[in-house]
Image (tube, helix red, strand yellow):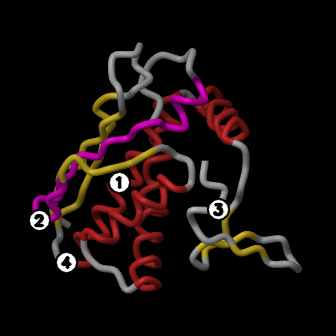
């Protein structure tokens, strides 16, 4: 196992704040995050929690893409690729494109080794819905950068947590409307 951080981590000696690429970060055990995630899902109900997470994740991904594009001088699909790479490096799972056509506001994203599936091996069903808003936000950033007005939506088509039916999770980004 590579013991060197795959992403740069800077720790402010005075405040203890961790940053990566200039963004403040939190470093917590996976079980801590997943247990909190499940507690909120139980309290609100899955449908309501998913409805709250989607726009929050969308906004965060859009903001991240904007900041990272400027910081690294990236544009177009390279920003979305960088986003998937950073998510993969930060322990959420291993993300890759099956396909992406920004001009059509479409993509298929594969997730292997999802943190949610690994943390809940006894649970059956789709458990990676939290990522859907993230991918729509990243796609809309691409659209805005290119001057396109089409908006994206994303949904989890299948999950590795569904009774062992799937080897990985699949997310589909599709166009919804013109602003």
Does any portion of residue 176 appear in the rendered image?
A: no
Total number of numbered discs in the rendering? 4
Name the residue: 34% across, 80% down: 74
Q: Secondary structure at mark 4?
A: helix
**Label 2 Cα neighbours within 10 Å, binned few <14 / some 14-19 / many ≥20:** few
Of badges 3 and 1, the one in the foreground is 3
Task: Please report the bounds of the magenta region as a residue range.
Answer: 100-120
**Label 4 Cα neighbours within 10 Å, binned few <14 / some 14-19 / many ≥20:** few
Does any portion of residue 79 appear in the rendered image?
A: yes
Q: Are marks 3 and 1 in contact (CB under 8 Å)?
A: no
Q: Which residue is mark 2?
A: 103
Q: Are marks 4 and 3 in contact (CB under 8 Å)?
A: no
- Mark 4 vs 1, N-terminal side: 1
Q: Which mark is residue 135?
A: 1
Q: Which residue is mark 4?
A: 146
Q: Is residue 104 magenta?
A: yes
Per the model, the C-alpha gap separating discs 3 and 1 is 28 Å
Q: Position of residue 128 (x, y in %)?
A: 45, 35
Residue that lies at the very extreme toward the right in this rendered image: 14
- Mark 4 vs 3, N-terminal side: 3
């Amino acid at each position: 196992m590579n013991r060197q951080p795959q992403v740069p981590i800077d720790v402010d000696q005075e405040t203890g704040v961790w940053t990566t690429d200039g963004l403040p970060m939190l470093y917590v055990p996976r079980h801590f995050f997943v247990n909190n995630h499940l507690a909120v899902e139980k309290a609100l109900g899955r449908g309501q929690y998913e409805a709250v997470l989607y726009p929050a994740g969308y906004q965060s991904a859009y903001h991240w893409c904007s900041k990272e594009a400027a910081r690294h001088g990236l544009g177009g699909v390279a920003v979305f690729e960088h986003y998937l790479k950073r998510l993969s490096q930060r322990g959420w799972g291993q993300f890759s494109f099956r396909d992406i056509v920004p001009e059509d506001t479409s993509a298929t994203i594969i997730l292997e080794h999802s943190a949610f599936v690994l943390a809940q091996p006894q649970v059956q069903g789709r458990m990676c819905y939290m990522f859907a808003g993230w991918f729509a936000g990243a796609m809309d950033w691409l659209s805005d950068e290119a001057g396109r007005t089409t908006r994206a939506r994303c949904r989890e088509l299948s999950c590795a947590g569904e009774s062992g039916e799937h080897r990985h999770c699949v997310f589909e980004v599709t166009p919804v409307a013109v602003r």
